[in-house]
Image (cartoon, rainbow, N blue to C red):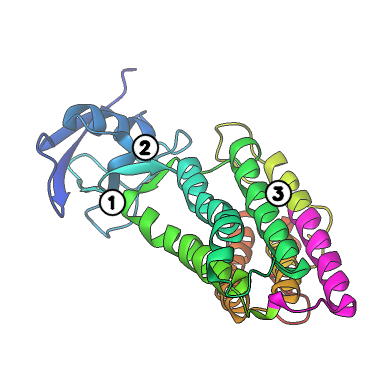
Amino acid sequence: MASKTLTFSIRPRGKPLKKLPEELSLPSTSTSSDLYAQLAKSSKTSIHRLRITKGSDGSLIPNTTSLPVSDTGLRDGSSIYVKDLGPQLSWRLVFILEYLGPLLIHPILYLLLLPRHSSNNTTPSSLQTLSCILITLHFLKRELETLFLHRFSAATMPLFNLFKNSAHYWLLAGLNIAFWTYRDGAPAAGASNPWITWPSVALYTIGELGNLNAHLVLRSLRSAGGSERGIPHGLGFGLVTCPNYMFETLAWTGICGVTWSLASVLFAAVAVVQMALWAKKREVRYRRDFGGKYPRKRFVMLPGLW
């Protein structure tokens, strides 16, 4: 028996695409990814720029091969709205550009700008040198993970978001921390207290290695190019929902103990608040997606606190 053809009325949301058709017909056996592909082809635009919602309730129609159009609630004659999300960048490229800022800024300010701010030709202190090493290694690790480890469920993000996200890293983690850490007269320019410095280095090391392990576990749950999800197990996952964020917090606590800089505390505080919100959403999603199979967590990021 031949499959039934479904015809949808297409409406623009926001600034319309120039070649967006007024109607689109698809076999009833088509998936939502077929809907996206046909609209992208008809409008001659990238599929990643499209956001399709139902006209009846405004709910999003996801771009996936596992969802038949007939299961989205769309019927023959239904209206759908198409929004142009604007220029897009791949998530991998966005992460690379975000982390590139502090990765370059810290060595540059340490090697080139510090002598210019010094009125007595003093050399960098051991804490300033250690701060530069730890922060540079942190963002180098992030770049390498982005290139070789992370698997992204979404392909792209709007170009505009690059500037917003980069400001967090380039300004707060890069220029702000570097200036207040490497300048002459900074707290880190003074003598090191081994009772604070080495425990901080230990926290940093534990945090970085634990964070890497959590990322390896999360990578194992998704195939290359896939968007499937699984329940993570392993170090830290029995304590909190997102041990990668827990270990990231430990690493930045260590950096704060080495730099003695309020700028480091500011960046860490902003990052912790953002990670806490992400972790809460992740717990909600795990409970929704896996139901009784998922062992619910009392704390999502920091044991005993959050």
Amino acid tagged 3: His
Residue 88 sits in which quadrant? top left
> Mark 2 belongs to which amino acid?
Ser
Q: Nearer the viewer, residue 164 or 233?
A: 164
Residue drawn where x is 46% and y is 41% of the image: 93
Q: Position of residue 270 (x, y in %)?
A: 55, 75
Answer yes or no: do the residues labelled 1 and 2 have beta carbons within 8 Å?
Answer: no
Q: Nearer the viewer, mark 1 or mark 3?
A: 3
In magenta stretch: residue 29 = no
Left or right, 5 with reference to 125: left
Q: CA distance from mark 1 to mark 2?
A: 11 Å
The answer to which image quadrant residue 132 occupies is bottom right
Residue 290, picture quadrant: bottom right
Q: Which mark is residue 53?
A: 1
Q: Secondary structure at mark 1?
A: strand
Q: Is residue 194 magenta?
A: yes
Q: Indicate left or right for 179 with 216 as reference.
A: left
- What's the amino acid at mark 1? Thr
Dot 1 or dot 3: first in sequence order is 1
Is 240 rendered above or below residue 25? Answer: below
The percent position of residue 135, horizontal first and vertical second, equals 67, 59
Q: Is residue 274 visible?
A: no
| Residue depicted at x 50% and y 41% | 92
Q: Secondary structure at mark 3?
A: helix
| Discs 2/3, front | 3
Q: Residue at x 60, y 31 (%)?
A: 224
Q: Is residue 49 visible?
A: yes
Pinpoint residue 217: horizontal percent, then vertical percent.
Answer: 75, 46
* Mark 3, residue position: 215
Residue bearing the label numbered 2? 32
**Residue name at image x 27 percent, y 58 percent:** 58
Residues shaded magenta: 188-211
